[in-house]
Image (spheres, rainbow, N blue to C red):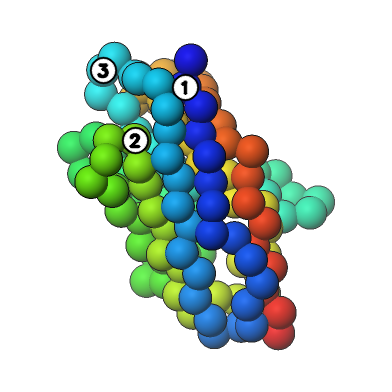
Amino acid sequence: QVRLAESGGGSVQAGGSLRLSCSASGSLYGNYCMGWFRQAPGNEREEVARIDEDGTITYADSVKGRFTISKGNAKYTVYLQMNSLKPEDTAVYYCATSLISDYLAGGMLYWGKGTLVTISS
């Protein structure tokens, strides 16, 4: 069983920055990935950024150049540095992890409870 906990959400004005943190307990026996997702009211959940165990990173087009995902020194730790925030970035942000094979087959298996990010104009 893998459990994740996010922190770092909050409220900032447009143009500001926030840094989200996520750490997971438990183990994944194989090549894994960790990612950040978000869901705004009335919208479907979308993938924001993902980092694979080998360091491969992908970003949603909407956040490229503004958000940076990185791994921490501790295994199963990931951060999301969010700069130049916009009101449309307002959402609940979720951290997730999975074996890469499971992710490719059907999506992330383990999820945190989410942290709210609110950007005011």
Of all residues, the one furthest to the right in this rendering is 42
What residue lies at 34% left-to-right and 19% top-to-bottom?
Answer: 28
Question: Which residue in the protein does label 1 denote?
Answer: 2
Q: In this view, does 94 lie to the left or right of 34?
A: right
- Which image quarter holds the C terminus? bottom right
User: Does 41 sit above or below residue 114?
Assistant: below
Q: Is mark 1 on a helix, strand or loop?
A: loop
Q: Mark 3 points at which residue?
A: 30
Given the current orientation, which residue lies at the most extreme left position?
A: 54
User: Which label number is shown at residue 76?
Assistant: 2
From where the camera sits, is residue 59 visible? no
Q: Which of marks 3 and 1 is in front?
A: 1
Distance from the alpha carbon under mark 2 to that under mark 1: 10 Å
For marks 2 and 1 on the same chain, the one whose residue lies earlier in the sequence: 1
Find residue 22 and report its image quarter. top left
Q: Which amino acid does label 3 sit on?
A: Gly
Calculate the distance from the C-alpha at mark 3 to the C-alpha at mark 1: 13 Å
Provide the secondary structure element on which disc 2 rests.
loop
Give the residue at x 51% y 27%.
3
Image quarter of residue 87: bottom right
Q: Do the residues labelled 2 and 1 touch (CB within 8 Å)?
A: yes
Mark 1 nearby-residue class (10 Å; few <14, some 14–19, many ≥20): some
Q: In which quarter of the image is residue 117?
A: bottom right
Of marks 2 and 3, the one in the foreground: 2
Position above or below: 105 against 118: above
Mark 2–mark 3 distance (CA, rounded to whole Å): 12 Å
Amino acid type shown at disc 1 = Val
Mark 2, other Cα within 10 Å: few <14 / some 14–19 / many ≥20:
many
**Which is more N-terminal, label 1 or label 3?**
1
Residue 97 in percent (x, y) is at: 43, 31
Q: Residue at x 34, y 35 (%)?
A: 76
Q: Disc number at residue 21? A: none
